[in-house]
Structures are given as structure tokens and as C-alpha cells.
Amino acid sequence: MTKDELQNNSFVVNINNSIQDAMGAITDNQRGTVVVVGDDLTFHGVVSDGDIRRALLKGATQLTPLSKIINMSARTVTEAEAKEGVVDEIFQKDNSVNLLPVVNDKNILVDVAVRNPRERKDI
């Protein structure tokens, strides 16, 4: 994906965005998770439906910045791993993983691997 494509899709949100922005993206992408990046596409982590729910229960609001609730220990794959088929192995082994950030050696997001990219859930 190009930088513009990464910054303008429902799988990626900026770290300065709010919980409300992430909720909208998660609703659009129907995968329960978004990848969180900085302005330069530096990978920071992910935010899931569960992260948002737990934050709201602890007193966060929809306007709380994602930087306050981000999961920074999220699984990523390198460009080389993605080319070697590691993404498919992870998707086969762990049904809870729906998105995998693909990063380069500088921790810059270069792609987002999506489980069943053509399938959409009925809402």
C-alpha cells in the first residue's frame, strides 16, 4: 500500500485520534481492531473493541486520545516474514487475530494484512 492508502483506510488510525474515531474505523472495517500509527506511519500499536470497552469502564470518554489506551505489545510481521507466508500461518493458528501490521526495519507501517479481506460481516 502507498502512504496515502495506509493513511486513508478504515484499518489505520492516527495516534492523535480519539476513541470515537477508532470506534468509527472499527465499525467500518468490521475486524474489531485498528492499527495505530504516527503522522509518519511509525507503528505504535493496535486498539481493539475490548481495549475501548475496558477504557470506557475505567472512565475514559469517546474523546479520550488513543495514546491513552493503545496496546503497544501487538504482534507485527516484517516485510520479509509477510513474503515468506508467516501471515497465513498466524491467521491459521490464532482465530482471534484479524489484522496484522506489516512493518519495515524502521518500524514504519508498510501494509496491513487482513484476514478474509473480501468478507464483510452483516451489521
Image (cartoon, grey):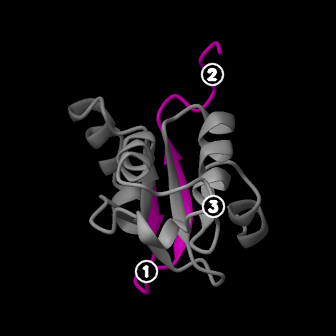
Mark 1 crowd level (few <14, some 14–19, many ≥20, 10 Å Cα)? some
Q: Quadrant of the C terminus?
A: top right
Query: Residue under circle 2?
Result: 120
Mark 1 → mark 3, Cα distance in angstroms: 27 Å
The span from disc 3 to disc 2 (Cα, nearest Å) is 28 Å
Tell how many labels. 3
Circle 2 sits in a helix, a strand or a loop, which is it?
loop
Q: Residue 76, located in which quarter of the rendered image?
A: bottom left
Check the image and report above or below for 33 versus 55. Answer: above
Amino acid tagged 1: Asn
Residue 13 spot, x, y in % from top left:
62, 61
Per the model, the C-alpha gap separating discs 2 and 1 is 29 Å
The prevailing secondary structure element of the residues shown in magenta is loop
Which residue bears the numbered disc 3? 63
| Residue nearest the viewer, comparing 62 with 23 | 62
The numbered disc on residue 52 is: none
Q: Which residue is mark 1?
A: 107
Circle 3: is it few (<14), some (14-19), or many (20+) Cα within 10 Å? few
Q: Is residue 26 positioned above or below 43 on the image?
A: above
Position of residue 4 measured from the top left corner of the image (x, y, whole percent)? 78, 68
Left or right of 28, for residue 11: left
Q: Earlier in the sequence, mark 1 or mark 3?
A: 3
Q: Residue furthest front?
A: 59
Query: Counting residues from the N terminus, which is met first, the one under dot 3 or under dot 2?
Result: 3
Q: Is residue 55 left or right of residue 11?
A: left
Tell me where residue 113 appears, x and y as whole percent.
49, 48
- Residue range of the region highlighted in magenta in the rendering: 101-123
- Which amino acid type is marked by label 2? Arg
Q: In this view of the protein, which residue sits in the foreground, 56 or 119? A: 56
* 2 and 1 marks in contact (CB < 8 Å): no
